[in-house]
Amino acid sequence: MTLPLTFFSAHGGADGRLGLTRRHFLRALSASLGLYGAKPLLRALSFPELLPARNRHGEQTTQPLFEEVPASKSGITWQHVNGRSADYYLPETTGAGCAFLDYDNDGWMDIYFVNSGKCDFYDPNPPLRNALYRNNRDGTFTDVTEKVGVPGGGYGMGVAVGDYNGDGYPDLYVTQYERCILYRNNGDGTFSDVTEKAGVAAPGWASSAVWFDYDNDGKLDLFVCRFGNSGRSENKYCENKKTGERFYCIPSIYPRVRSWLFHNNGDGTFTDVSDQSGIAKSLGKAWGVVATDINNDGWMDLFVANDTVENFLFLNKKNGTFADIGLESGVAFSQEGRPRSGMWTRPILTKMAGRIFLSPTWTTKCTPYTKTIMTRPSTTSPDRWASGGLPA
Ligand SMILES: [Ca+2]
Ligand SMILES: [Ca+2]
Ligand SMILES: [Ca+2]
Ligand SMILES: [Ca+2]
């Protein structure tokens, strides 16, 4: 089963350019924050085609903010394949991530797409691959995957972009089921797979990841979400007892697992500090993570959205360790005390001083919901928080 790819173009570029440069993207994002506030922004990011456009005075216009650009115009013909099988392996239920990045530093945003691929329960023929599209600066893109050397090669889940070696060129970390890939940007239009040397393969089922500098040494470290073990050997059989119809098992029947934290050694290698940092003590089923300084102390913290178990809020203790304060901060469970089905998350910073909105999104009974958790840092102690749910 293939999933069609939809690419949206924003109207109204100041210089008439089509496509998304980094400048346009950030400008559009900041404009959205300023004009619409956090609540409408969530809707805009989730369902952009439904959001009416507004002019610079905030007045609604009839022109939609986004329009779909067909593959015949954009040149983006790549399709995602989810690898659905009769054996109902859980990784098949997940779509894949993508990233906007300017890999060649020409000032124009390029796009990297992640696909499924060969693993212990899937062997597609012909083989599948990821895709990197270079922005041609005229509203079209060119697939440069093979030339650049970033095809992937496993059952892909997502991608995190960060300049881990500080050379000014963005690097790619591709999360996958079984084994992740670190692609180093060589700065000459090509990438190299340096996963083994770097020591960041993160075996297991990695869902997403974030680059961030947790020890403030100026080098990007890496947190990798791990969802669980549900490949060929661990796959379970779930069915409707009345009809006998098989379905994908609810993740709650699979055991919790630890995620990964890698420290950047500054020489192209990383050290697994999951245990010594305290991260590994929190067992979950992590789908999404954001790094943000929740208490404004200058040290990056982590919020991890888990599926069917409590969320984590890792407070940076400034000594290389983290403390999970999810429970006392009120973000671990729902207001009813139940674990959420966290799918992904993002931080939204508002003009309200000191407030950060963490927004895990989850599904219940196949109906999508978005909910915002508001946290207010205490002025007296970073360990004391107030929280409240704000339905979107
Ligand atoms: Ca570019
Ligand atoms: Ca780099
Ligand atoms: Ca660091
Ligand atoms: Ca902090």
Image (spheres, rainbow, N blue to C red):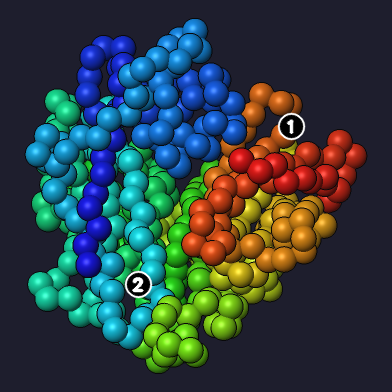
Tell whether label 1 touches label 2 (CB within 8 Å).
no
Q: Is residue 75 above or below residue 265?
A: above
219, 181: nearer the viewer: 181
Q: Name which quarter of the figure residue 146 lies in.
A: bottom left
| Residue that mark 1 sits on | 354
Crowding around mark 2 (Cα neighbors within 10 Å: few <14, some 14 to 19, many 20+) is some
Q: Cα distance, mark 2 to mark 1?
A: 40 Å
Is residue 382 shown to the viewer in this render? Answer: no
- Report the amino acid beneath label 2: Glu
Q: Is residue 387 above or below residue 94?
A: above
Q: Secondary structure at mark 1?
A: loop
Q: Kindly identify the residue that appears in the image at 56 percent across and 70 percent down.
A: 285
Q: Kindly identify the residue that appears in the image at 66 percent across and 50 percent down.
A: 301
Q: Kindly identify the residue that appears in the image at 33 percent across and 50 percent down.
A: 98
311, 93: nearer the viewer: 93
Figure quadrant of the C terminus: top right
| Residue that mark 2 sits on | 92
Figure quadrant of the N terminus: bottom left
- Residue 22 spot, x, y in % from top left: 35, 29
Horizontal arrangement in the rendering, residue 303 relative to residue 171 (left or right) = right
- Report the amino acid beneath label 1: Gly
- Residue 168 spot, x, y in % from top left: 35, 38
Horizontal arrangement in the rendering, residue 324 relative to residue 86 (left or right) = right
